[in-house]
Amino acid sequence: MLRSVALLSVAMSSLVEEMESKTSLDAEWKRIQEKTFTRWCNEQLKYREIVLSDLAEGLSNGVNLIHLLELLSTKPLGRYNKKPRVHAQRMENVDMALNFITKIEKIRLVNIGSGDIVGGNKKLILGLIWTLILHYQINLGLGLNDKSKNQKMSAKKALLGYINSKIPEKNIKDFTSDWNDGTAVAALVDGIAPGLCPEAETMDPKDALANAQHAMKLAEDWLSVPMVLGP
């Protein structure tokens, strides 16, 4: 009996440790995602001299979300509350933004309403920003039909196809481990602008961070690719 209790205790302890580890990894991923998406939003909003320090708070009254949509779509959304003071005015702004996304731009949104944005639901707000990135930068940039049921898969395949057309020697298969040593980033920079990063061929994979930093700085300085990701 005591042995069974001891084994059960060890098993429970291991399960708790595993769950804590998973929670920690999830929290770190969300932190990185939020940081990256905030940088992406700021890259768009800089044309109106707007800077978001907190994504959820910065979009909660709908004003900056409307600015973002006008910049991405190059269409005016119409009159809105530019200085919303009460909850109802914030809701009206966000309603206008979401209606524009779904009814005018025909972008499908799932499980997000005005209350989620006004209330600062970070998980759903990150999902909204990803949907905007997917539509305005990935699908439109690659000429994809984002009304497809396989929208995300087609975007991923199209991106991989584009990358491998530029750096076939790297045989890129994913957006995770194939990029870890920085040499693929450097090769892609040189593939897009031949001669910009010829050292990509001789980079030491052990110098992963330095490789990524060098390649991304070249992309930012010469190709106007902002560092929305940290090296």
Image: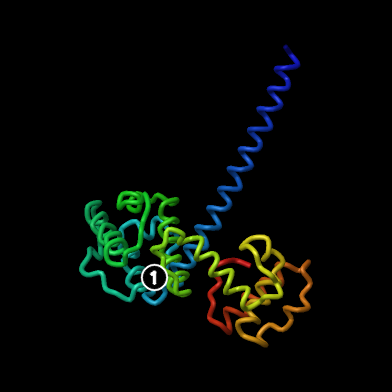
Amino acid type of the residue tagged 1 in the rendering: Ile
Residue nearer the viewer, 118 or 3? 3
Looking at the image, which residue sits at the far front? 149
Is 144 drawn above or below residue 89 in the view shown? below
The quadrant where residue 45 appears: bottom left
Looking at the image, which residue sits at the far bottom? 195
Left or right side of 155 for 85: left
- Point out residue 180 in the picture as x, y percentages from the top left corner: 69, 64
Left or right side of 136 for 12: right
The N terminus appears in which quarter of the rendering? top right
The quadrant where residue 162 appears: bottom right
The quadrant where residue 213 appears: bottom right
Number of numbered discs on residues: 1
- Point out residue 58 in the picture as x, y percentages from the top left corner: 38, 60
Is 111 drawn above or below residue 66 in the view shown? above
Where disc 1 sits, the SS reads loop
* Residue in the image at 61% along x and 77% along y: 165
Residue nearer the viewer, 134 or 39? 134
Q: Mark 1 points at which residue?
A: 50
- Point out residue 183 in the picture as x, y percentages from the top left corner: 71, 72
- Point out residue 89 in the picture as x, y percentages from the top left corner: 22, 56
Left or right side of 176 for 35: left
* Residue in the image at 36% along x and 75% along y: 48
The C terminus appears in which quarter of the rendering? bottom right
Tell me if mark 1 has few (under 14), some (14-19) or many (20+) residues whose alpha carbon lies within 10 angstroms of its own. Answer: some
* Residue in the image at 22% along x and 70% along y: 78
Residue nearer the viewer, 110 or 17? 110
